[in-house]
Amino acid sequence: MAQILIVDDSAIMRRNLKTILVQAGHTVVGEAINGGQAHLMYRTHVPDLVTMDITMPNVNGIEAVKLIKKEFPDAKIIMVSALDQRSMVLEALKQGANHYIVKPITPETVIEVVNKVLNIQPNVTNEADLQPEETVPDGADEAPFTIENIDNTFQIKLSPNLSEDSFAMLMQAVQGLMFVKPLKVLLNFNSIETLPDPLLPKIADIVTTVKRAKGIIRVVARNKNFVTSVKEKKINNLSEVMEGI
């Protein structure tokens, strides 16, 4: 499994993250309390992954990402942020962070994001593991959207839980990307089967916004019926660029 560096000025948060990661089979090679210390420890250990708090004394998480990525461009960094630090998370993503986790953390979220960044496939030991313990609809707790910086492309992944309220947060996040040059965006509907009709023109505004900033955007979806439906609706700046994958 992976060697991981934990960066957080809170001893409690470091302990919680370490417990989660060690129980998942990873090795915590170091713990740093600020960004400057994180940079030095990264040089020493060159870990597979860093969990990086944002608000820390002396050198904060964003500055630490800049320092580490400048010297180690392939470094994999997950930001750990509070709910009200969205703009700072986006800045960290611009600087090369790979993903983010919003506090309060849960073991499930931490491991899911770590596995995603490290491209680790979770082990399923038996058929029972595939059965949900509670009768919760599939994807009911899935975030309405995520934003990742992968190979200098901002990948915006939408889920069926996207609503008009959460779209407002998404559009705010997109606006924060407009200062990145060159700007590359992949808007991914994944396997979404349907979305409320009023949302589709709003999502088309994302395409318009990126193009106005002279950015490059690609719009994809896995569900062929959904792709066909969007194209038939002839939504300006969306229907014509939608493609199946």
Image: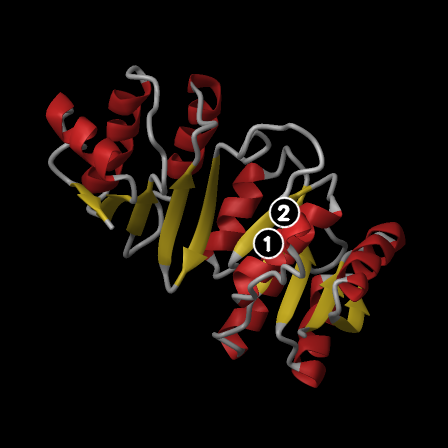
From the viewer's side, name the closer residue of 182 and 101.
Answer: 101
- Residue at image coords 59%, 32%: 141
Residue contact at pointers 1 and 2, CB within 8 angstroms:
yes
The answer to whether 140 is drawn above or below residue 103 in the figure is: above
Residue 85, horizontal then vertical, whole percent = 61, 38
Count of marks, rendered view: 2
- Residue 171 is drawn in which quadrant? top left
Q: CA distance from mark 1 to mark 2?
A: 7 Å
- Residue at image coords 22%, 39%: 224
Give SS at disc 1: helix
Residue for badge 1: 113
From the viewer's side, name the closer residue of 221 and 87.
Answer: 221
* Residue type highlighted by circle 2: Ile
Residue 140, horizontal then vertical, whole percent = 56, 29
* Neighbour tally class for label 2: few under 14, some 14-19, many 20 plus, Cα within 10 Å: many
Residue 25 image label: none
- Left-right relation of 241 to 209: left
From the viewer's side, name the closer residue of 25 and 154.
Answer: 25
Residue for badge 2: 101
Residue 17, horizontal then vertical, whole percent = 78, 56
Earlier-in-chain disc, 1 versus 2: 2
